[in-house]
Image: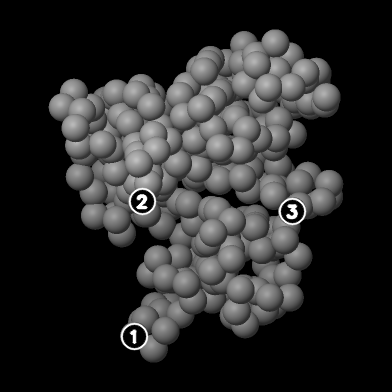
Amino acid sequence: MDLQSQSPLIEIRNVSVSKHGKLILDSLNLRIEIGENVAIIGPNGSGKSSLIRLITGEYHPLSSKADSSLRIAGRDRWNLFELRSLLGIVSDDLENEYMRSIKGIDVVISGFFSSIGLYQNHVVLPEMRKKSYEILDLLDIGHLALRNFTELSAGEARRLLIARALVHDPQALVLDEPTNSLDMKAKHKFRMTLKKIASKGKNIILVTHSLEDLIPEINRVILLKDGMIFFDGTNKEALTSEKLSEVFGISINVSSSDGYFHAWC
């Protein structure tokens, strides 16, 4: 897919989103350039997942705002299948949909069809299978190819879904709360996986409430509060005790070392 180099990956202008009569995103203005790695951080209910659903086309801007716009790679209209080829999505919702007996390699291949599993009408070409195995090897999870998805740990399942998201060679990998339910070892493996993906030139858009999810390659942080952007800047500017305490509504301490951040109350 050709991208116009002069266009940002994501451009949101004065966009609001309402659900069940409640404003969940309020007058957002956001621009993410191709090649940028960004973390979107905020407490539960701040609008993080709603912003991702807006970007991926699940939520739509309020039509009453004539001066609002949402463009992905310079376009304001996308076929959802095309959009998913541009943005590789990994979320808890997707993982929950895969709670069935399916081999790891078939989970990855299903990314070619944007489906939950493989079905009789899917024609799996040899090059699809070959590329799927190559991605498993890239992420050091080739040993999961023949394992049933339901037998995997949470960390293994998450890395397998990342592989699924990469089959279309998307420009950006969008991760929505990717380390929920992961233990310390699995979180470490996840961060190493992210570093490897970042080294390949992919955009990483990471949605999280945990500073420990960030890798040094993510150097821009957007803080969300009550459906609005509270702060947008470098990780060092955004991830301060003062700003995070105000966003989360509790006293928070922050420390950093070698580009990694840690927070505690």
Upstream in the sequence, badge 1 or badge 2?
A: 2
Please determine whether, in this image, residue 61 is positioned above or below residue 127.
Answer: above
- Amino acid type for the residue under numbered disc 3: Ser
| Residue ID at (66%, 25%) | 248
Tell me residue 191's x, y (percent): 70, 42
Q: Is residue 182 left or right of residue 45?
A: right
On the rendered structure, is 159 left or right of 59? right
- The amino acid on which the numbered mark 2 sits, given as a three-letter code, is Glu
Residue that label 2 marks: 58
Can you tell which quarter of the image residue 128 is in? bottom left
| Tag shown at residue 121 | 1
Residue 14 is labelled as: none
- Label 1 or label 2, whichever lies nearer to me, is 2
Do we see residue 66 in this rendering? Answer: yes
Q: Is residue 34 left or right of residue 4?
A: right
Question: Which type of secondary structure does the marked residue at label 2 adopt?
Answer: loop
Q: Residue furthest left?
A: 66
The disc label shown at residue 181, or none: 3
In terms of depth relative to the viewer, which is nearer, 154 or 162?
A: 154
Q: Residue at x 70, y 18 (%)?
A: 245
Query: How many residues crowd around disc 2 within 10 Å: few (fewer than 14), some, or many (20 or more)?
Result: few
Coordinates of residue 144 in the picture (x, y in percent)? 69, 71
Rendered location of residue 131, percent (x, y): 49, 65
Name, please, the residue furthest toward the bottom.
120
Image color mode: one colour
Q: Nearer the viewer, mark 3 or mark 1?
A: 3
Q: CA distance from mark 1 to mark 2?
A: 25 Å
Question: Which quarter of the picture shows residue 68?
Answer: top left
